[in-house]
Image: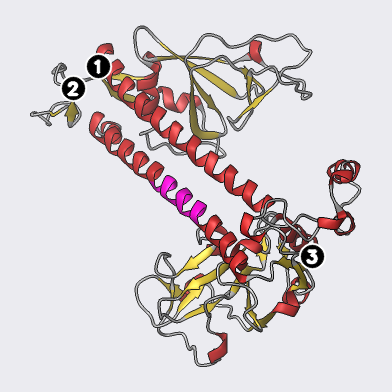
Amino acid sequence: MNKHKNENKLAPKLRFPEFTDFWKTEQLSNLLDYERPDSYIVKDTNYISDGTPVLTANKSFILGYTQETFGICNDIPAIIFDDFTVDKKFVNFPFKVKSSAIKILRPKGKNDLKFIFELMSLIRFEAKEHKRYYISAYQNITIPIPLPQEQQKIAATLSSLDDLITAERQKLDVLKAHKKGLLQNLFPKMSESEFTGLKNEQNEENKKFRKSSNSVNSDSDNVPKVRFKEFEGSGEWEVKTLGEIYEFKVTNSFSRDCLNYQDGSVKNIHYGDIHTKFNTLFDIAKERVPFINSDISIDKIKADCYCQEGDIIFADASEDLNDVGKSIEVVNLNNENLVSGLHTILARQKVMILQIGFGGYLFKSDWIRKQIQRESQGAKVLGISASRISGIKIKFPKNKKEQQKIATTLSSIDELITAQSQKIEALQVHKKGLLQGLFPNINEQNG
């Protein structure tokens, strides 16, 4: 692949050596046909899986079929587009459709649909008319386009990269599933009595659990399903309330406006970062943490309210039940000053019973997460308080070596997940660079 020598003409920066002709411009309406998928619509919602993907209104696939007669879209490939989102989906397998708002785009002539799809992804497109994204707005856009043979070569290159990214994402999914299984098996499950104390015990999920409760051995509720060989026969885990192990420290209420990422003497944990980016085991040397602005007084922050290694920090508010009470454990401060901020609860062990690193994963275990969800309050925004969270039960092995083994095992999986995520991100950056090099600037062409 060579850099093109004459960049004043309509051509990308990067070319395959066998192609030298300059690109022409065409309106999308001359390159694509579109249709409403009326003959493919699935109206029934009672899906029974037959392995055929059904496309929903938000362009995500579910598997299913209905008793109703309908067609399957076999004329592939296709670009999926609808009137409610700028996102598009390239599909190269048979599918069914559940929304009449969806449009199916087909190539005209010998044009390569994958090539056009990637080119369309570079268009800066703004919503029109009540925030709807009408397909007609796309049709009038003029784009640069080469001969079909070069389209196919570019499309094949990008497709091979997409296949690689997909394979790496599948590896990431396997790692996440493995970690989820470890979290379920390395910590004791709920006993029947503990389970029936949770909210919504009359829902169908709970009924199924109670029906299968004969699989739960009440004599081993305080022993995990999977135990490392060297700790087999070490007896049941200790059961305490969180308030017996932890005490709570005062946090601040500094908003984002009081924080910056450039300079300062004290860093601050914002609850939003617990929800979105911080790792379970919080290492300040590996995380991007904002400072408190230098013009904000921190004189009222007591010395023992600064974070210490081994502290658990909970986010006390969330719009999502799955995230309420989400937590991190501080495992390395690197001699830096750190405080716990807006909408957080700072918990510190009264006596170091739990090994540093173990607590972070303990509070990710299913049993504790369900208790925290039970104690949350609110309608649109859910909240958890220190007083309510202090009453939840925690279970832990008395032997700190067992605690450490569990923490080390889960931490090693997290490191693999992080490395795999970074690999995928690098591939995505590489693809973005290829797109910029393999296509002329489409937005310059459209002013």
Residue 185 seen by the camera: yes
Q: Which of the image's four quarters has the C terminus?
A: top left
Q: Residue furthest top?
A: 109
Looking at this view, is 388 or 416 the one in front?
416
Residue type at the position of mark 1: Glu
Q: Residue at x 54, y 56 (%)?
A: 409
Q: Which mark is residue 16?
A: 2
The magenta region covers 412-422
Gap between marks 2 and 1 measured at Cα: 8 Å
- Please state if 14 lies on the left or on the right of 426 as rendered: left
User: Is residue 445 found inside the magenta-colored segment of the image?
Assistant: no
Q: Position of residue 177 (x, y in %)?
A: 59, 43
Label 2: which secondary element: loop
Residue marked by disc 1: 150
- Please state if 127 lies on the left or on the right of 58 as rendered: left
Within-10-Å neighbours for mark 3: few <14, some 14–19, many 20+: many
